[in-house]
Image (cartoon, helix red, strand yellow):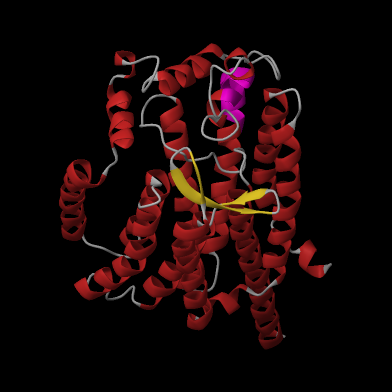
């Protein structure tokens, strides 16, 4: 009970509205409440996972053996997908276990954050040396390649974003940033001509001009923009979103959750969502910056980058700024693997907050003893 009293409740206050908004939107999408009840189960499971992670001392994760073990487990699951995974919408990215689909790339995102937090925290003074950049890239390239080959372009982009963002915040110079920008252009060109599948190229082309093919490649983007715009200031009301209720908007419980929510809640609802995310980011960054070492600071930054990547891609593709890809909105889109991963990350952040407060109380006690 003492641990619960030391919880950072403001952090949970940033998450709770997002979970509620997502559940309310799912309940309004269909008459049988299929996604609502399954997501409610996942909310319960992920909350239990968060509590377990909060009660476990986060410093156990600083062990190289623990981090490398989690990394090897993630890579092993991604390899196993090629043999026993099942495909949905052209991507072989899921295991089917007990009536639920499990997507291993989601925990891999968290495992990579732990790997990079460990690696960069021990080498932040000499991170600009090429060998450290190259070694950290090797940790990235194995899971990112496996994810890309499934194929899952959206998740592989998230993995790359986590790596480059954590690397930049670890102390790279402007020269290195320019070098990476040039390398990114070269990789993009190679990917376009030799790697991307035809349907992926079609999505990119449709992004620039969806009106050219409004009934096929541009259909999703057009319907999403219509849904967002039709919400106007106050929205149409929960359960009255015509784009999602009448199935004009596909995958409204996952890839187009933002559009479905915006149609029903309007601009006011969107403001509430972003205020909740702002509170969440503030608490994560505050806890991380007040923590005692670089590992926990970098871990908190990595979790923020994971959230930023998902929010930017999801919202961007829902309002026509980015190509369509299967990236969910954190805490709101349907998906158990994603939600459990996020809540596990929040649990670790809570563990950092709890143990940091213990350390502060201990230091304050020592200071009081010295001055008495």
160 shown above or below 278: below
User: Percent x, y for residue 14?
Assistant: 64, 44
In the picture, the quarter occupied by the N terminus is bottom right
Q: Which residues are magenta?
A: 260-272
The residue depicted at 71 percent of the width and 86 percent of the height is 369
Between residues 30 and 302, which one lies in front from this camera angle?
A: 30
Camera-side residue: 105 or 59?
105
Of residue 7 and residue 70, the one placed in the foreground of this image is 70
Which quadrant is home to the C terminus?
Answer: bottom right
Q: Name the residue nearer the viewer: 246 or 56.
A: 246
Vertically, is 75 above or below 271?
below
Q: Is residue 266 magenta?
A: yes
Query: Residue at coordinates 36% horizontally, 32% vertically from top-left?
Result: 323
Q: Position of residue 104 (x, y in %)?
A: 53, 57
Q: Is residue 315 visible?
A: yes
**Residue 178 among those drawn in magenta:** no
């Amino acid at each position: 009970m003492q641990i619960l009293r030391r919880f950072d409740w403001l952090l949970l206050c940033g998450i709770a509205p997002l979970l509620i908004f997502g559940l309310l939107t799912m309940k309004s999408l269909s008459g049988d409440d299929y996604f609502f009840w399954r997501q409610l189960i996942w909310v319960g499971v992920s909350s239990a996972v968060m509590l377990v992670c909060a009660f476990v001392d986060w410093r156990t994760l600083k062990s190289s053996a623990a981090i490398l073990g989690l990394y090897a487990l993630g890579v092993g699951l991604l390899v196993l997908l090629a043999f026993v995974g099942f495909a949905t919408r052209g991507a072989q990215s899921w295991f089917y276990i007990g009536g639920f689909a499990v997507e291993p790339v989601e925990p891999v995102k968290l495992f990579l954050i732990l790997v990079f937090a460990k690696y960069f925290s021990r080498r932040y003074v000499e991170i600009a040396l090429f060998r450290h950049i190259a070694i950290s890239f090797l940790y990235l390239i194995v899971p990112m390649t496996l994810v890309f080959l499934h194929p899952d372009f959206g998740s592989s982009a998230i993995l790359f974003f986590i790596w480059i963002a954590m690397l930049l915040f670890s102390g790279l110079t402007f020269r290195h940033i320019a070098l990476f920008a040039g390398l990114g252009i070269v990789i993009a060109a190679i990917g376009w001509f030799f790697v991307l599948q035809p349907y992926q190229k079609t999505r990119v082309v449709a992004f620039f001009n969806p009106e050219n093919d409004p009934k096929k490649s541009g259909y999703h983007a057009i319907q999403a923009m219509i849904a967002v715009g039709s919400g106007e200031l106050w929205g149409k009301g929960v359960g009255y979103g015509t784009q999602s209720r009448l199935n004009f908007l596909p995958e409204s419980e996952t890839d187009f959750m933002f559009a479905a929510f915006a149609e029903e809640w309007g601009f006011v609802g969107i403001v509430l969502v972003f205020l909740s995310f702002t509170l969440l980011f503030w608490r994560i960054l505050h806890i991380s910056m007040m923590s005692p070492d670089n590992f926990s600071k970098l871990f908190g930054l990595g979790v923020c980058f994971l959230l930023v990547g998902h929010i930017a891609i999801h919202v961007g593709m829902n309002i026509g700024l980015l190509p369509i890809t299967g990236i969910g909105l954190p805490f709101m889109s349907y998906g158990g693997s994603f939600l459990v991963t996020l809540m596990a990350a929040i649990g670790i952040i809570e563990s950092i907050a709890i143990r940091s407060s213990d350390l502060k109380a201990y230091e304050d006690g020592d200071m009081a003893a010295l001055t008495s």
